[in-house]
Each structure stands twice: as C-alpha cells, then as structure tokens.
C-alpha cells in the first residue's frame, strides 16, 4: 500500500487517528528506509506519527523492517551486548563508554551504535575516541572482550536519513525511539537500553516482549543507556517475552555522592574512566549493579 494511505490513517489527529497493524507498519517503514517516498511524505509521516504516538505493535513492525535491512554485526564465541547511544552528555559526564568497557572486562563483546541527534552535547563516541576506540567505518565481527562503536549510517543510511529529519522539523520522530530498541547483532546478544520519560517504560517493555528481544531496560542518564551514577534506577529484564523487575529503584536521600568529573569535558571524562578501569577510583554502585545484571543476562543466552 502506498504511503499516502498510511498517512491518512495515522494523520487524523490524536482522537481520529487509526493504529495500523504490525504488518502494515513493516511495509510503511520499509518504504521509508528504502527511500521510496518523497521528502514531503517523510515529513508528513514523522509529524503525523509524532502526534498520534506509536503503539507497541507498530513499533514491532518498524523493527521487523529495520532488522530485514540493516547490516548485521556478527557475534563471536561470547554474547554481544548492544548499547544504543544517541543523546550524549548535557550536564553530567557521559559514562556509556565506562559501561561498555566494564562489560568487555567481563569477556563480553560490546557494540555501541549511535549518531549525533542533538547539537551541543558530548557524545559517547567522542569519549571512546579519546580512549583509543575510534568509530568503525565498516561492519566487522566483535571479539570477546572488545568494544566497537558503529555509526548509524554504517548500519543503514536510510535510518540515518530519518534521524536527520529532526534537524529540519525540530522534533523527534519514530526513528529516535526505534534505534533504542533495535538489535543489529546476528547471533547471541543482549540489548541494554533506556528511557527518559517514565511513560515510555511500559511501551518499550511491551515492544521488546513482542519482538522477543532479550534486554535490560532502565531509566538512563540524560537519555543514555547507563545508570545514573548518583542513584540506582529501576531495572527490568525482558526474556522470552516476559518482563521481570531485577532491580528496585533507590529511594530516599543519597548516603554517598560519587566523585565524578565536573562537567562534560571529553578528556576529563576519559581520564576518569581510565582511572576506574585501573582500580584507582571505585565503580559507582548503580553502574556496578547494571554491569552485574547485564552480565548475568548475557551469559544466560549462551
């Protein structure tokens, strides 16, 4: 079906819009990824779906189409942990690279994927580069104990194009939610992902369950999939379509505030991470708990 018919269904406002099926959503998203529609139609879809909001079934369909088209990353003997990184640091240091490197120290392969989606933020890829981990320009197998950063455009240029629409229209679209739910790995893997606004916790968990994705889901730090180092968030495991709470959220006053870098400077953040990895500074407890839960879930996939 042509995209105009889909836009008619979803573009009737928050009250009159109709949800489409998983199969229809896959067809629609495939047209967008394949570049089979005009820029005007892309913009119309993005704004219409922004107003309506995606259902878990629709997002599952978008993921079906994405997984059929993206370049897959091969898994070696060890499971691969997938970490989306699309927000970067605004006020706090971006510690997604610390999470990735701690997981690699557990003999897991780690794939971090992302692209800049907001101006003025320090990115995980910037810090990884400062730590000697430049972005990959082609897809390669990730070895046990290694961390690879793969830009979204390498995974699929059409997906990058949809993310870039934000620079023109000024608001997020379905692609920004999708990249936090997709799994580019072909083989045994675990997705570690996050939400910012609590209302997304339910829809993301339902989508992960629908797509039978094994995942650790939590409220992240400024949109990144790493636990806030100052306070332990709630964490949920999604396995075989079942959603289970594995970590309660910390409540009450903080007994101890970790010694973090001031601000978001790339070099200061990289130096802090290097010190933590060298055992010169402690791993913040919320991140240590996240690593423990992710390691256990990943090893269960073998």
Image: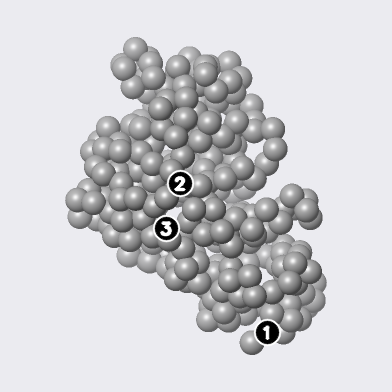
Residue named by callout 3: 183
Instruction: Reply above or below: 29 against 21.
Output: above
Badge 3 local density, few (<14 within 10 Å), some, or many (20+)? many
Badge 2 local density, few (<14 within 10 Å), some, or many (20+)? few
**Quadrant where the N terminus lies?**
bottom right
Labels 2, 3: front one: 2
In which quadrant of the rendered view does residue 161 lie?
A: bottom right
Is disc 2 placed on a helix, strand or loop? loop
Labels 3, 1: front one: 1
Q: Please name the residue shown 63% across and 67% down the image.
A: 54
Q: Where is residue 278 shown, x and y percent of the image?
A: 31, 17
Q: Earlier in the sequence, mark 2 or mark 1?
A: 1
Is disc 1 placed on a helix, strand or loop? loop
Which label number is shown at residue 277? none
Residue named by callout 2: 137
**Quadrant where the C terminus lies?**
bottom left
Which label number is shown at residue 2? 1
In the picture provided, is 104 more to the left or to the right than 82?
A: left
Instruction: Reply above or below: 121 against 25.
Output: above
Q: CA distance from mark 3 to mark 1?
A: 27 Å
């Amino acid at each position: 079906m042509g995209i105009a018919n889909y836009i008619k269904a979803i573009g009737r406002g928050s009250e009159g819009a109709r949800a489409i099926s998983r199969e229809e959503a896959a067809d629609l998203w495939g047209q967008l990824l394949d570049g089979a529609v005009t820029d005007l139609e892309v913009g119309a879809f993005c704004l219409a779906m922004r107003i309506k909001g995606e259902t878990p079934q629709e997002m599952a369909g978008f993921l079906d189409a994405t997984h059929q088209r993206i370049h897959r990353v091969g898994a070696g003997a060890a499971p691969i942990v997938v970490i989306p990184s699309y927000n970067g640091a605004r006020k706090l240091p971006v510690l997604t690279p610390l999470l990735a490197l701690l997981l690699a120290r557990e003999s897991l392969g780690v794939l971090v994927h992302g692209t800049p989606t907001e101006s003025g933020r320090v990115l995980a890829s910037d810090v990884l580069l400062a730590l000697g981990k430049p972005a990959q320009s082609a897809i390669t197998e990730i070895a046990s104990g290694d961390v690879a950063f793969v830009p979204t455009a390498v995974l699929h240029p059409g997906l990058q194009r949809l993310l870039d629409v934000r620079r023109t229209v000024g608001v997020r679209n379905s692609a920004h939610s999708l990249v936090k739910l997709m799994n580019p790995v072909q083989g045994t893997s675990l997705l570690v992902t996050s939400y910012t606004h609590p209302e997304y916790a339910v829809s993301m968990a339902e989508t992960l369950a629908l797509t039978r994705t094994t995942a650790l889901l939590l409220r992240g730090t400024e949109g990144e999939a790493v636990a806030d180092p100052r306070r332990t968030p709630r964490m949920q495991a999604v396995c075989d379509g079942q959603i289970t709470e594995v970590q309660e959220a910390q409540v009450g006053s903080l007994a101890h505030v970790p010694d973090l870098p001031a601000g978001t400077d790339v070099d200061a953040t990289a130096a802090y991470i290097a010190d933590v990895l060298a055992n010169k500074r402690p791993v913040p407890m919320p991140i240590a708990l996240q690593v423990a839960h992710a390691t256990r879930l990943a090893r269960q996939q073998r």
